[in-house]
Amino acid sequence: MFNRLRKKSLQLIVLTLILLFGLNFYLAQKYTIMAPGIAVDLKEIVTVENGSKDKGSFFLTTVSSHTLNLPLLIYAAIDPNVEIKPKEQVIPPGWDLKQYMDYMKKWMQESQKIAEVVALKKAGYDPQILGDGAQVVEIMPDSPAKGKLMPGDIIKKVDNEQVNIAEEVVNKVASRGIGNMVELEFERENKTMTVTLPTIESKTEPGRSIIGIYITTLNWKPILPLKIEINTGEIGGPSAGSMFVMEILNQLTPEDLTKGRKIAGTGTISIDEQIGEIGGVEQKVVAAVRAGAEIFFVPEKNAEAAMKAAERFDIEVVSVKTLDDILNYLEKL
């Protein structure tokens, strides 16, 4: 009798462990957890030649992403600042987290160079940022470009307008509207080819037009009149672009643009000074609050979500569309 009960108990334990292992495996395959990351004082990682750091602080904000497992599932159930998302909304299908992070590091580097050019132009210099086009890295499974573009193709024109860097391709496609046709001219094995594709809606940024490809700039050629060093370590993605611009400007400007405040923010920056939407804004608001920020600049399309996330905290969320929106707001402080 005792042996029979012991055997059944052992079987139950084994079955429970198998079920837990299976559930853990399923969660890891299907879901990603997004939690508030860190806020970094940009004075600590940005150095501009002949610039001054004896001023207030601009912070970049981050999101911490991890493959979901059972302990993190419990953590997400307890912490209201943590969000669980289907993996395909965060990481391209077929990619693992390392591939995605490597790609995001490339976009971080690109966003830094764009920020340097924008900031130096705003400060009265004449920098240039050149490239040999946008090279295709990967095609999304549901992309209209599938079977028409290939990894290694180099996009040279969008709707007959020349593009030198990947950011120009992204912005031109985004401006076309969902479902509209866009013509790409590209090079493949030294041959010039064209293709016309419909845009689709981004799964990670609803309302944004994409063509479902991952690209990077081929052969960066930044020509800058001043030396600027930015050391972001393992942080990836383009969403700190607007704050990089503000920190560079602050180091080059005689007055303190922050007026002594702790200011955080997020948003991509384009060559024409437009501030673009990003992901994980709710978690970035929390990261800003934890760093003691008083003001949080956010792209207009992310403003509603950011303001909702900020309701529990003592921080002012400011919606912006352009770099001048930030500068004008700070001027009135």
Image (cartoon, rainbow, N blue to C red):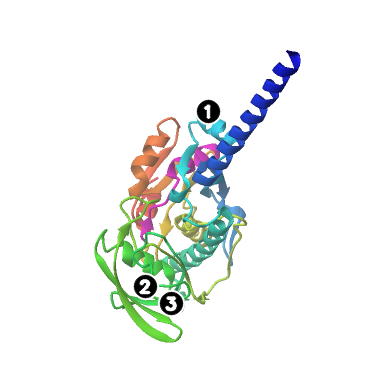
Looking at the rendered structure, the secondary structure element under dot 2 is loop
Q: Is residue 165 left or right of residue 56?
A: left
Q: Are marks 3 and 1 in contact (CB under 8 Å)?
A: no
Helix or strand or loop: what does disc 3 sit on?
A: strand
Residue lying at the far bottom of the rendered structure? 190
Q: Which mark is residue 78?
A: 1
Kindly tell me whether residue 232 is visible in this rendering.
Answer: yes
Quadrant holding the N terminus: top right
Tell me if label 3 and label 2 are in contact, CB under 8 Å: no
Task: Give the position of the C terminus as an image quadrant.
Answer: top left
Sequence-wise, the earlier of marks 3 and 1 is 1
Q: Residue at x 47, y 38 (%)?
A: 83
- List x then y, in percent, for residue 87: 48, 47
Q: Which is nearer the eye, 327 or 95? A: 95
How far is disc 3 from disc 2 in space, using C-alphas? 13 Å
How many C-alpha atoms fall within 10 Å of the one at disc 3: few (<14), some, or many (≥20)? many
Q: Could you say where residue 266 lies in the image, as x and y percent from the top left? A: 45, 50
Magenta segment boundaries in residue numbering: 274-291
The residue under the point 51% across, 77% down is 219
Instruction: Give residue 148's mark.
Output: 2
Residue 288: within the magenta?
yes
Residue type, mark 3 in image: Ile
Q: Residues within 10 Å of mark 2 (few under 14, many from 20)?
A: few
Residue shown at the point (35%, 53%) measured from the top left:
325
User: What amino acid is labelled 2 in the image?
Assistant: Lys
2 or 1: tag closer to the N-terminus = 1
Instruction: Name the residue tied to disc 3.
Output: 154
Sequence-wise, the earlier of marks 3 and 2 is: 2
Q: Circle 1 — which element?
A: helix
Q: Pick out the residue farthest to the right.
A: 3
Q: Position of residue 264 (x, y in %)?
A: 48, 46
Q: Position of residue 306 (x, y in %)?
A: 39, 41
